[in-house]
Each structure stands twice: as C-alpha cells, then as structure tokens.
Amino acid sequence: MLETSLCGVTMKSPVIAASGTFGFGLEYADYVDLNKVGAISVKGLSLQPRRGNDGRRICETPSGMLNCIGLENPGVQVFVQDILPQLQQYDVPVMANISGASVGEYGEMAAILDRDGIDFLEVNISCPNVQNGCLAFGVDCASAAAVTDIVKKNTTKPVIVKLTPNVTDITEVAKAVEAAGADGISLINTLLGMAIDVDTWKPLMGNRFGGLSGPAVKPVAVRMVYQVAQAVSIPVVGMGGIMTGRDAAEFMLAGATAVSVGTATLADPRAIAHITTELEAYGRDKGLQHISDIVGKCQ
Amino acid sequence: MAGIEALGTVVDNHLIGPDVYRMELAVPEIAAAAQPGTFVHLQLTGGSSHILRRPFGIAGADTTHGTITVIYRLVGEGTRLMAALPNGSTLSCLGPLGRGFTLTDKPAVLIGGGTGMAPLLFLADRLGGRNTTVIVGGKTASEVFWTDWLSQGRVLATTDDGTAGHKGFAVDILAEAIQAAGAAMVYACGPQIMMEKAAAIAAECGCSCEVSLESYMGCGTGGCLGCVVDGRDGKRYKVCHDGPVFPAEEVFFHA
C-alpha cells in the first residue's frame, strides 16, 4: 500500500521525517522504528559547525509555532564521520539537508556528501533564520537555479530543492530549479513570522523573526503544493502542518508524491509512526491498491 | 532513556499558593520511572490549537498509588486551561524526560524559589530527610507556602520583606546552612540569579552544586534544539536532554 518511489529511491512509505524536527534520527530510535520511516531528512547541515541563534528559539502560536533555531549543527564533516555511520545501521533512506552561505559552499557540501549512506540531497534554499545566504537563494529564480546547478554538478544523488513560501509566486522558483536540473522539489519551508510580548514590548523570539509551522500553515502549504505540482513535472514532497494520516492524504491529493512530518513530531515523538499507520488505513478505507493512486487526484 | 507516553488522569488539581496549583496525575508507568529533577511533558488538549507540550519538573512520585505531581503557576493560556481541568480529566503525559539530580548520601542543602521549589520537593522526599536542609525563598510570607509540603529534613524560609522566616534572600543564609549541615552538595532550582549566586557560594564552601535550568522547549526529546543553552568550553547543551539538571560549573562558567 505505502511503498513509494521518490526520484528513483524506493521508500517503505511516503512519510518522511522533516529536517530540523527529528534530529539526526538517532534521537528518536527509542520512540519510532526507524526502519519503517519513509526517509529521514537530517537536521540542516552547513559546511562549518554553527552554534545557532541566541535567545528564545521556540514560541507556540495559535495552531502552530515559531522557531528561530538558526541551523545549529556540528557541520558536514562531523556528520559524515560520527553520525552517518550510526544512521547506516538502520534500513532507512537518508536525506542530507544542506544550507550554504554561498553557491560554492553548496557545491562543496554536495561533493562531501556524495557517498554511501546518503540517498538524497535536500537543498535548503529557504531557511528564514540565518543572517547570510539561504533564504536569499530561495527568493530569486537565478540564485535558486545557480545553487541547484552546482549541487547537481557535484553529486550523483537525487537532488531535491526545498522551497520557501516567502515569495510572490512559488511556481516561478519551482520552474527555475527544475530547469536547472533538480530531481524533485520539497515545500514548504516555514513562513516568516513574528510574535511580540505586549508586556515587555519586545519580540518574543531571540532572532526577532521566526519560521511559522504547524497546522496554522497547512492551507497555505496545500495550495502551494497544488500549484507547484501543476507547474513542474518532477516529483514534489509536500509538508506544512501534517498532523494526521488524512492531512498526509490531502497533500498527496494536491500532487505530492511523498510528504514530510515536522512540527507534529515535536508534539508527539511517535507522530510519524501514527501518521503512517493512519495513511495506510485511509488507503484501505478508500479501497486503494496503492496510496500513490491518489497523487494529484484533486483537479 | 526515552520517555514513556501515557494517558494521565487528574486526581487532584487545586490552588496551593498565589496563582500556584498542584496537580496530581494517575499515570503509574511514569510514576514508577520518575527520578528527582526529571520532567514530564504534558499535552493540553486533544485538539490542535495548542500543539506544543508543556514541560513541568516532577514535584513528586507516589509509586504506591501510581501518581505524579506537578506544581505550576498561572502564566498564560496553557496553564489557565490546566487549572480548569476537573478530577477525572485525562492528559497525554510524556516522561520522565531529561537528566535529574545526582542523589547523595552525604549532607546536602536544597535551595529554591518560586516554582523552582517543585522539583526540590521530590528531591527532598527521595533524599529522605536524613542530612538534608531545605531553604525556601520568597518575596513575602504567602510565597513560602512550600514549607507546608516539606515533611523531611530541616526546613528554613526567607522572605525579602521579613514577613516569614529570615529577612533577606535565600542565598543570604546558604553559607551558614552549608556549614551547619557540613554539606557536601548543594541543589538549586529557581530564578537564574539565585542559582548563579548559590553556585558561587557552594563553590566557596567547597561543595558540589547542581542546578536545574528552565528553558522554552519544543519537543522535550532532543530533536529540535529549541531549548539549547551555552555550556563551558564552547559547548551547547540541550536543556531537555542533557539537563535540565547540570553541574553548576558546566552552565555558569562565566559567572
């Protein structure tokens, strides 16, 4: 029912653990059978280690949350040497999520990660929480294409480009990365948001702004997945506020070949397992042979 | 160790101090595993309007009756919803999470203020009263009600205005309490400034010191890096996973 092929990689389910919400996967091995997860998109990696942002990083908002972690991670070398070997004990596709401060850094990371144990690259051109780079690449078609191009030239792995919703027309960026050779597109990264403490008159978040995620963004995400799936012919990974199997089905109906679960894991460390089970039950209830039968069926 | 996710039933939920509530939840699996200093991550509703759990230091665990206690102050919408829960309501509980206090057989002083007292109640209970001194600090008499919940060991109170116990801050009488008890260990939980001063005094007296930190958390399970604090030598610690209890020198290195 659930077996899914994404950019030529076979996954046991279309439900992926979203980057930044599942650590490196190992943190959740006691909660979830990692061997049953569709794929794990690891915490966003940068070329050098990053300490992330100071101050408050998390804030709940109505039906959602803001975060401004700021890409804290040990750097791609430590990931490759110390973390990846542990992850390779599990039979689960690994998506290396990368962020660069320059086009060149994306290329360097792609080359370092072109190795056994990595199944996909997810190119983050959409993190709203770091000062230089990243989001800037995702809001401009030429930059987005340049990043995609250099990553493709430095890897043999399928390249999935993760897009930001913080643009006027996301289909333009989607078409630009497809033309530059992207094998797939994932969306949406978080919506740039803000919360203010009305008692202290100061921003709640340490980095002033944060990325909004959770059920609050789901209708925006479904709309964008629908638009992008119509605009490109490469597979789309949909995400944004998926809390249940029915939410996952909604994204697939909009045109997503696979889906990612993020904020739900913060509320329930077993969310991905529950959502996978629910999606399978949904498929059975609808009399489907295979869950992929619903992809793009909302017209 | 991974936390246990289980449905807890509210068996007690009432006001015990100014804006402070005590909730007892029947959740035997977590009660059996709880250790002082660990926390439980509570989910408020089955709906999606409040999606994140709320972390609370465990204030007591009764393994006979299978209950845990959390003590919380009304600070926002979430805690107001909690306060409205009648007995018999259920909450999804995830816990015990985090690294708790290192229990000692040697004389120890526990020092706390505000809801920071909550995990210290559990610690005092498990240390069993032999050789323990607990210092409860508050602004005024109504804030040191915690002493009513301490049945073990020597209990001292301080108030800023002198309406109960010693007039002054809790840390003002820490050195004397350490010396009187011949303490080898200080455990602190409360406002950051209180913990930093307590740690400095403990160090001067040659005592080890553990502090329990508070941080805004996302997952509570080490996955999101929402609660990270600076550690000594450039380290970053996840309060939820590496703490919330730390050796003071690991997190107050610049003090």
Image: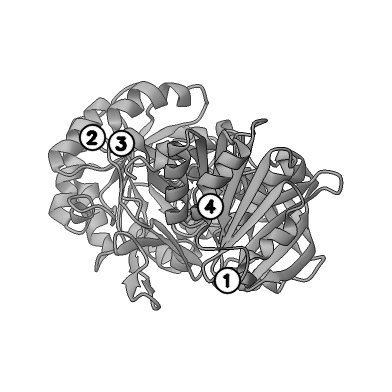
Which of the chains bears the disc numbered 2?
A: A
The part of the image, by quadrant, that contains residue B78 is: bottom right
Q: Which residue is mark 4?
A: B173
State the residue position of label 3. B234
Cα distance in 3D space between marks 3 and 2: 15 Å
Image mark 1: chain: B
Depth check: give the residue in front, A169 or A294: A169
- For the residues beneath circles 1 and 3, the answer to whether they share a chain is yes
Q: Is residue A290 visible?
A: no
Three-letter residue code for mark 1: Thr
- Taking depth in this image into account, of B163 and A106 the one nearest to the observer is B163
Mark 3 or 4: in front is 4
Q: How many angstroms separate mark 2 from mark 4 (CA)?
A: 47 Å
> Label 1 crowding class (10 Å Cα cut-off): few <14, some 14-19, many 20+?
some
* Residue A200 in view here: yes
Q: Position of residue A228 (x, y in %)?
A: 33, 59
In which quadrant will I find the C terminus of chain B?
top left
Where is mark 2, residue-wise?
A: A48
Q: Nearer the viewer, residue A160 or B23?
A: B23
Q: Which mark is residue A219?
A: none
